[in-house]
Amino acid sequence: MSGAQVVEHPAGISWVLTGEPMQRASHAVGDGDGVWLVDPVDEAGAVQRAQALGPVRAVVQLLDRHPRDCAVLAGRLGVPHLRLPDAVPGSPFEVRTVVDVPRWREKALWWPQQRALVVAELLGTNEYYRLGPGAVGIHPFLRVLLPGALRGLQPEVLLCGHGLPVTGPETPAAVEEAHHRARLDLVRTPLKLGALWRAR
């Protein structure tokens, strides 16, 4: 496994495998009273840094086909593995249903006090998602369906399952632009994905 880039942000830390084409991203979110690992990849140094933030309360899996190392880490740490939860007990998060169809069931976490949004697959920040000039993009397979469950939240911390975090006052506009641009990006998708494939 390639080394992970660890990024600190107001909601905790993220570790991103920037050496991979899809740049899998994992997150530790919470405060001193508790930390939740979200869609984690078992990268030893990053997990240790996550534990330093506070006691780990649970491991959260936000996508049905995204098990990653959730079960392994939950077992090792002796905490619950919450797969597609409707709620995260004892946490500051609201759980939002993003997609609920066969073979694609996805949840997201919204932390109102921190204005932090944790998304598994709908939104992303790597090249696979960002077909246009924006910092955030919609998953190519969801650009027609275009779920609206996360619109209007105005996050200032965006943590995605793929790519580096996006934070700051420009984040809400970047997320909204991604939704507005989604169907236009359908035209760009074959060209961009072809270029990414040739560059592998």
Image (cartoon, rainbow, N blue to C red):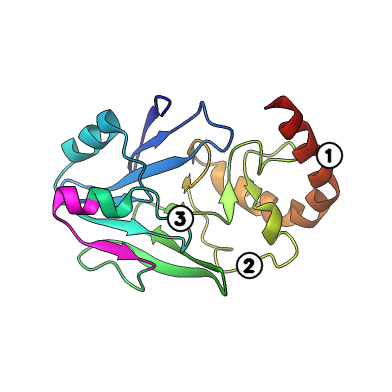
Q: Residues within 10 Å of mark 1 (few under 14, many from 20)?
A: few
Query: Could you say which is closer to the camera, residue 154 or residue 189?
Result: 189
Q: Residues within 10 Å of mark 2 (few under 14, many from 20)?
A: some
Above or below — where is 71 with respect to 149? Answer: above
The residue where tag 3 is placed is: 66
Label 2 to label 3, Cα distance in Å? 19 Å
Q: Position of residue 151 (x, y in %)?
A: 59, 63
Query: Could you say which is closer to the camera, residue 74 or residue 122?
Result: 74
Residue 48 can be seen in this image: yes
Dot 2 falls on a residue whose secondary structure is loop
Q: Which residues are magenta?
A: 74-84
Which amino acid type is marked by label 1? Answer: Leu
- Is tag 2's residue or tag 3's residue first in the polypeptide sequence? 3
Quarter that holds the C terminus: top right
Left or right, 77 with reference to 123: left
Say which residue appears at 34% left-offset and 48% top-offset. Answer: 69
Q: Which mark is residue 147?
A: 2
- Is tag 1's residue or tag 3's residue first in the polypeptide sequence? 3
Q: Position of residue 185 (x, y in %)?
A: 79, 49
The residue where tag 1 is placed is: 191
